[in-house]
Image (tube, rainbow, N blue to C red):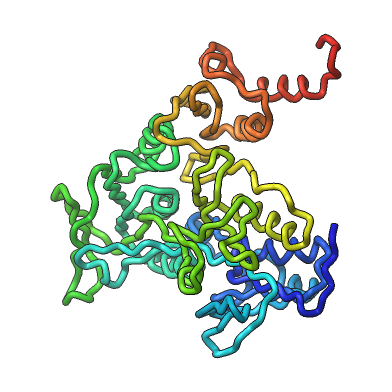
Amino acid sequence: MSRVSRADAVVVVVGAGHAGVQVADSLCEGGYHGPVLLLGDEPGLPYQRPPLSKDVLSARDEPGLLPLRGERHFADRGIDYRPDAVVTGIDRARRTVLLASGQEIGYASLVLATGAAPRPLQVEGSERAGVLPLRSLADARALRAALQSARTAVVVGAGFIGLEFAAAARKRGVDVAVFESGDRVLARAVSVGTSLHIMQVHRAMGTTVLVGEGPVRLEGAGGADGAVRAVVGSRGSRHPADLVVVGIGVRPRDDLARGCGLAVDDGVVVDEHLRTTDPAIFAVGDCARFPSPAGPLHRLESVQNATAQARHVARVILGAGTAAYVELPWFWSVQGPVTLQIAGLAVADDESVTSGYPDGGGFSVLRFRGDRLIAVESVNRPADHAAARRVLAGTERPTAAQAAAPGFCLKEHAGRAVAAVRRPHGLAG
């Protein structure tokens, strides 16, 4: 592997989430001897994001900070980590970034790991006190404090964040209503069968789930800026709310890229090596829109994708990465008694074949495009998820007919596929 040692070969990483931290770590692990600056726009150490909608909210006692790395980690590796370092602009001609403090920092390579920001709710009363997003540690702590006294909560949006919050709030005894303007929960992420199952689980926990209905007005005490007290839906329903959580998706934080003239289209557009339209600038994680092997650009919001892209960019900067970025995406979500794990990417029109027992014991939904397996959704079946990742990373995938046959087991299929690959050519099994 190439070892870069030029003193002026500064790599600046903008964003200290999972992607940014992994870029810095992978550069150091790969033998990069030039300066590495990691710029975060929040105070304190970089922290883990997934627990914000789970552990931080549901824990009875005040949870401690969940740092991505220990306090000495960056200094020990020679990484110059700077919290509260807000980047306001990029000068591509001079290869510098401008900080809100007025400082300019030069770079040889620049990595944008700026993540995404919550989409704001834009209905009457959405500016009231008690209407909160859930994206940062500060958001999670504000919601946790509000849950100490809240008796009722309304969630706007039945995506992963909204449903994880709903489950955590129900665990604390809070009455919860979820508004979803679409026709089902998690519609962008899972099949109809998995969606209906998860909705039934939330309703069994006592959560009111309203599909096909969005909020039109947030009512409150006092004047227009008084605290929220109720949410009125598009079908006329009215639900009391000491707290409203907004989970209607995110927008990529691509303002820096747009401001300096890089290509932007629902994220920072990158090529198969995760380079932007400027070869000295890369983008990774939630802010990056990248090509899939099939061709179309897409953007993923997951820790796995963020860290995998970060490692790839580090290899490219080190001169060791010539292959295109190709990684199997996978996701997970914990919602009360349900652990949902997804491997691969499917769309609404893909065929679904269910394996297992939706009424008890867990199940998986195998998604097919044509007769090719492209994704697997597993509910309380971790062994299936592990098998799905092995199968989807290989070439021996089951057909839809095989998956629909009585007694089909994805774990057994994965085992046979591995054995077939290892078996010497020309020998019977």
Q: Residue at x 77, y 79 (%)?
A: 8
315 sits to left or right of 280 = right
Q: x, y (%) of residue 52? A: 51, 60
Q: Is residue 286 visible?
A: no
313 sits to left or right of 169 = right
Q: Is residue 295 visible?
A: yes
Q: Nearer the viewer, residue 119 or 287?
A: 287
The picture quadrant where one finds residue 132 is: bottom left
Q: Nearer the viewer, residue 239 or 30?
A: 30
Q: Residue at x 51, y 61 (%)?
A: 268
Q: x, y (%) of residue 243? A: 32, 63
Q: x, y (%) of residue 375? A: 54, 33
Q: Residue at x 16, y 77 (%)?
A: 223
Residue ranking furthest to the left: 236
Q: Nearer the viewer, residue 57 or 255?
A: 255
The quarter of the picture where the N terminus appears is: bottom right
Using the image, determine if residue 150 lies above or below residue 39.
above
- Number of labelled discs? 0
Q: x, y (%) of residue 240? A: 23, 58
Using the image, determine if residue 101 lies above or below residue 366.
below
The quarter of the picture where the C terminus appears is: top right
Using the image, determine if residue 264 lies above or below residue 138.
above
Residue ranking furthest to the bottom: 102
Q: Residue at x 64, y 44 (%)?
A: 327
Q: Nearer the viewer, residue 172 or 301?
A: 301
155 sits to left or right of 232 = right
384 sits to left or right of 116 = right
Residue ranking furthest to the top: 428
